[in-house]
Amino acid sequence: MEEKSEVTCEDGPACSGSVERTGKATSTVKSEITEQTRREVKTFAAQILKVLKSYVTQQDKDYEEWLGVKAEDRVTVSVEYPLYQQSQACYAVNTLIDKTAKVHKRTSYCGGERSAADYQDVEIKREVYQSLLVSGKIFFTWKKMKCIASVFFSGNYSEASFVHAKKHAKTSKKFQAELREFMCKHNYFKGEKLEFMPYSRIKFLSFPDLDWNSLILKKELKDEIALNLIFPLHNQKLCDKFNVPWRRGVLLAGVPGTGKTQLGRVLCNKLDGITVIWATCKSVQDVSRVRNLFEIARNFAPTLIVMEDLDFYGQDREFTTNPIVGELLNQLDGNAPNVGVFVLATTNRPYLLDKALADRPSRFDIKLVFGLPDVNERRAMINLFGKKKNIKPSVDYIARMSDKLTGAHIKEVINYAQLVSLNDGREEIQTKDIDLALRKVKTKLEAQRKNNLVR
Ligand SMILES: Nc1ncnc2c1ncn2[C@@H]1O[C@H](COP(=O)(O)OP(=O)(O)OP(=O)(O)O)[C@@H](O)[C@H]1O
Ligand SMILES: [Mg+2]
């Protein structure tokens, strides 16, 4: 929940004088348009004022009629919610009032009878939708307190405000406390797998059918991941007893297509009951969103934050003045204790990362390098990607021929070979299809290497 802040123009009323400051040419245009537009603007402003006045008067009448007191004897309690709490707050306000109050009437946000209150199907749990009032007013009585809730949970803004008579201040405090408690209790994001979206929205995420076997990695790497993330996330008590901080940062570095993102997906399914919140460079675009991301992680802890492509926003301060780096340093190891907050970040350009971010334990405690697969891993990958396919050449042959290719490339070789065979009217993938696919993938890779697109 955020306190409201007022936006002011530094220039004050002088803002409107910007036309004068733009020089001669603008002044001529200004004098030409002045008389013609001034009248129109005046009329338009007068109309708006009239509408606003009538709206305010009508709203005031409605409020006075329901609350039984004049404007000066009323109090408004406003709560602004961050967008990631939008559906939760909307559900809480609607449900608490429905369950514990006596509802007199619901109107549109502007009041009056001309437009209806706005209901929408809101996802209140994974794949559970409920029709809720997202924009409108609820006139209700709660424990003898008459109150009007104005809710606006729509677009990029979330707010609920409650108007009541001053004499009900105590009851109003109780109501707000119950509302907060309700929201905590019905925290249906806790333990869920979530995507952190642009503007700090969140939505449910799922990766069906992926398990530990969907990831082909060296045993040592899998063991490190289990030791640094899976084990501590499930063992808070042990960590506390032996004074091991219950938080950890793991940085994954490696060339594109080696399975870093795949690991994040697999962990979503492996970490039962643990919140996973998945952030990309698109969603972490400014300082406030970084703050929101960690706020969610702390609220829904134990949490694993997956930060994809960290080099996009965590670049060394020598190369950029990006304030996101500063906020990241602060959120990862600042004053907030981050109990139960684990971070898994991925990059394929670790050399670009800020030193204080990447090279210091307690922000990222351990760095794991995802390299190219060896022959055994390539064999396992061919078996994995070749499922449901009829491949004639031996796994050994393809594994030998795909030296220096990443997992993503091997997957492409097999899929390309299958398309070639199907296009040829055959279900079976033959050696010539594999050879053709290998040639295609390797030629493309070679060209990229020459142009320095791949290291
Ligand atoms: N080690 C692996 N085990 C299983 N599948 C893999 C592996 N590496 C790559 N793949 C396959 O290749 C696809 C691409 O891999 P992934 O997205 O995980 O690469 P990445 O390392 O995250 O690359 P980038 O650095 O470009 O983001 C995956 O969806 C997966 O199917
Ligand atoms: Mg990736």
Image: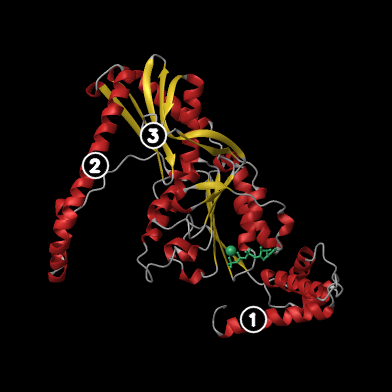
Q: Which residue is mark 2?
A: 47
Q: Nearer the viewer, residue 398 or 136?
A: 136
Q: In the shown orientation, is residue 399 left or right of residue 154?
A: right
Marks 3, 2: nearer the viewer: 2
Identity, as a three-letter code, of the amino acid under mark 1: Lys
Residue 15, image x, y percentages:
18, 55
Which residue sits at x=72%, y=69%?
411
Q: Earlier in the sequence, mark 2 or mark 1?
A: 2
| Numbered disc 3: secondary structure | loop
Marking on residue 444: 1
Quadrant where the image shows the N terminus: top left
Disc 3 and disc 2: Cα gap in Å? 20 Å
> Residue 151, relative to residue 97: is it above or below?
below
Identity, as a three-letter code, of the amino acid under mark 2: Gln
| Numbered disc 1: secondary structure | helix
Marking on residue 211: none
| Numbered disc 2: secondary structure | helix
Q: In the shown orientation, is residue 382 left or right of residue 327?
A: right
Neighbour class for label 3 at 10 Å: few (<14), some, many (≥20)? some
Marks 2, 1: nearer the viewer: 2
Q: Nearer the viewer, residue 322 or 414?
A: 414
Quadrant where the image shows the C terminus: bottom right
Disc 1 and disc 3: Cα gap in Å? 58 Å
Residue 326, image x, y percentages:
37, 58
Q: Earlier in the sequence, mark 3 or mark 2?
A: 2
Q: Nearer the viewer, residue 447 or 276?
A: 447
Q: Which residue is mark 3?
A: 109
Q: In the shown orientation, is residue 214 left or right of residue 31?
A: right
